[in-house]
Every structure is written in structure tokens, then in C-alpha cells.
Image (cartoon, rainbow, N blue to C red):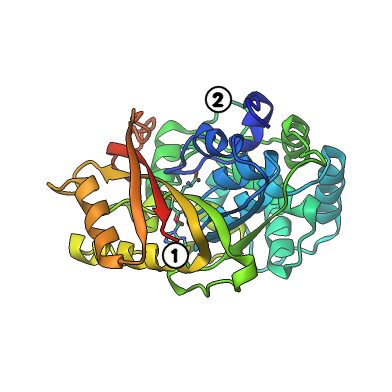
Amino acid sequence: MPGKPLKPYTPLDHLCPFFTRFPLSFPLNILENTYPPKRVFDPFCGCGTTLLAASVTGHFVSGMDIHPVACAVSRAKLASATAEEVIAKAEQILETTPVNTQNKQNGFWNLCFHSSVYEGLLRLRERYLQGNLDQAEARLYGIVLGILHGPLQKGKYLSNDMPATFAPPQDLLSAHWQARGSKPPPYSLQRLIAEKARQLPILDAASGSGVVQENSFLRAEAPAAENKFDLIITSPPYYGLPNKNCGLWLRSWLLGDDEASASQSQELHHQSLTDYINDLGEVWKKAASFCRPGASLYLHFGKVHGSGAYSSLDVLHESVKRASTGWTVRSIDAVTTAAKFMARRNFASPSPPPEDEWRIQMLLNN
Ligand SMILES: C[S@@+](CC[C@H](N)C(=O)[O-])C[C@H]1O[C@@H](n2cnc3c(N)ncnc32)[C@H](O)[C@@H]1O
């Protein structure tokens, strides 16, 4: 499907703000020129950019991520459901799911969400905890995660005024709202869901299929020979940018996490560069065990500001050498890095911006 236009997929690509995503054009440019359909894998799938690109270009794709929010957003992107199915499902959940009466709105929550929105969110949270979501529900939760919080003026987020990309700590948010006397908007949850659902494309019959697994790649079991992958397109967490800095606690809460201990997931070690290089070596070893001989691994990789005086390419080469499992670096191209993590209005960004970024292709020797 060469030259597949990006535009129809932009609303789905932008379904939910997510730190450290790469542009849809990166996996799409690789996959639209790849025939016949391949088995594609992203072991650090984040908000599902590779998954969306593979699905719309007709490949089979599998994604893995350790973070529940990343997995929910990725599943929403792969879900095949019409807007009307999503809207009907939202109505059903909001009308029939019992609310846990112990979750009375108080303190922070009074300032964050209007009471009618909060009650609806509790019902959605309750339903999510029951599990076994169908396709319409998978799409629905991606939508609600996306509209859960953001700036007040835009009229498209459910929360009181806050950044969309990350959720600052509760005490900073409460102080911000109290200082400005700003109130949570009394929007209709159902209306916002319906508006968003209608903006999203339905993946057509020619789309590839896909699955998403919530797991640590470092602990995942390699697939059987017939299920190994031809292509990996991925971006592991950069050194100095662990998950806990990504401000996902409020979105994690919607998916049932305790607000105080939202998903501090295990991942690559960031205590020292040596630990990180070792873990990255394990990633390449694991990646080799997931792939067929001759497979390609495309990587978005770099370093963040303030993470030390080292070269990200040296880290890459050293980790590949330590893995010694047959990956050969084929090409390295510099990416023009946009300062993606600029300070958001009134709140310091939880993580520094990237200092350099690269697109790398590696090949698994036969
Ligand atoms: C750089 S982001 C990937 C972004 C993705 N390319 C996108 O466009 O959204 C790295 C992802 O790796 C995930 N992660 C961190 N440690 C992991 C592990 N051990 N196993 C699987 N995923 C992990 C993080 O939760 C995060 O979503």
C-alpha cells in the first residue's frame, strides 16, 4: 500500500497524549513499502504507533508494554468498532454499572472533576476492573483516557485546568486551581465521548490484525518458531527517562490503580549507565529470540538532556556488542528532534527533552 496518506489516521494516532511517542510516519514509511504482509512486533509499544501503522498497512502486529495505560491506548487503536457501537457501550456502562459508594467525591477530586463527570468516571473505572472488554469498549477506554485531562479553555477535556500530556502531583494541581479559583467544567461525559468517537476512523477490512500484551519484555517468553517475527519497530525507554517520570498517574487511576501508588512499573534500569547498557544488551538478546533469521529491527533511540556526558550511539554499539546475538547495525540516521517536552503552562514538565535522536536499522544474521 505505497504512499498511504497519513491524514485519515491522525485522530487515531493522537487519541491520547503520550510521552516519548515517535511520529506515525516512522513505522508507516517502513511498512507501506514492505511486501508481502509481515509479522511485526513492538516490545515497547507505548501508545501503539507501530501497531496503528502496521494495522493500516495490512500486516499482523503484536505489541507489548509494561504500562497498563500504554496497553489500553494501544488496544483502542487496534479496535474495530464504529462510533455508534462505542457510544451505545458508553451509555450502557454509564447507566447500568453500579458505583462503589465508598468512593465519595472529596478533597482533590472535588476540584478535579465536576460531580456528574466524577460519578461517570467511577462507573467506567468499575467496568474496566471487571475485565473482558469487547472491541467497542477497547476503543471507548482509549477515548476516555484521551479526554480525561487537559487545558480548560479548549472545551474538550473533562478535568479542571491542567496539562494534557502529563498529570502533575495532586498538591500542585490543587494549589493551581485554588489560586485561580478555577472550577471543573460541567461537561456531559457522554457528549464528549460521542464527539470524539465520531472523529475516529474505522479500520477497514483490509487492515491487518493485532494483539497487545501487558508484560515486561525482559521477562517475556519467546514465541514458538512458526510465530516469530520478521520485523521489530520500536523505541525502548531512553536512559534517564523512567516511566515514573511520565505523569500517567491520573490515567492509571481510571484503569483501577490506587491513586497513591499508580503504576511504578519495573523496566530497564536507570540507576547507572552501565546497568542501562547491560539491560539494553538483554533487550537485543530477547529481540533476537523473538525474530526469524534475517529479521530487521528498526529503532528510534537517543538521549535526554541532563542524563550525562556520553554518546547515545556509543551506548547502542556497546549494548549490541555485549548482546552478541547476531544483530548488525546497518544504518544510522539523525532525527531532527522537536523539543517535545517543553514546560507546559504553569507546570514544570516531569521529564527533560531529548538531546539527540536517531533512526537505526539492525539486521539479524541468518
Ligand atoms: C519510548 S516509549 C515507546 C513509545 C512508542 N514508540 C510510541 O510511539 O508510543 C517506551 C515504552 O516502553 C515501556 N516499557 C518500559 N519498560 C518496559 C519493559 N521492561 N517491557 C515492556 N515495555 C516497557 C514504557 O511503558 C513506554 O511505554
Crowd tier of the residue under label 1, counting other residues whose Cα lies within 10 Å: few below 14, some 14–19, many 20 or above? many
Asked if the residue at label 2 sits under 8 Å from ligand 1, the reply is no
The quarter of the image holding the C terminus is bottom left
Of residues 326 and 314, the one drawn nearer to the viewer in this rendering: 326
Q: Position of residue 140 (x, y in %)?
A: 73, 48
Q: Position of residue 356 (x, y in %)?
A: 27, 37
Q: Which residue is mark 2?
A: 153
Query: Residue 272 appears in which quarter of the rendering?
Result: bottom left
Q: Position of residue 215 (x, y in %)?
A: 53, 68
Q: Position of residue 207 (x, y in %)?
A: 75, 42
Of residues 339 and 8, the one drawn nearer to the viewer in this rendering: 8
Identify the residue at the far left of this view. Answer: 309
Q: Are marks 1 and 2 in contact (CB under 8 Å)?
A: no
Residue at x 73%, y 30% (from the top left corner): 199
Q: Which residue is mark 1?
A: 288
Q: CA distance from mark 1 to mark 2?
A: 48 Å
Q: Amino acid at mark 2?
A: Gln
Crowd tier of the residue under label 2, counting other residues whose Cα lies within 10 Å: few below 14, some 14–19, many 20 or above? few
Position of residue 340 in the picture relative to residue 223 (left or right):
left
Q: Which mark is residue 270?
A: none
Residue at x 79%, y 40% (from the top left corner): 206
Of labels 1 and 2, the one closer to you:
1
Q: State whether residue 120 appears in this view.
A: no
Of residues 61 and 288, the one drawn nearer to the viewer in this rendering: 288
Residue at x 43%, y 51% (from the top left corner): 170
Q: Amino acid at mark 1?
A: Ala
Q: State whether residue 299 appears in this view.
A: yes
Of residues 171 and 35, the one drawn nearer to the viewer in this rendering: 35
| Rendering quadrant holding ligand 1 | bottom left
Residue at x 76%, y 39% (from the top left corner): 203
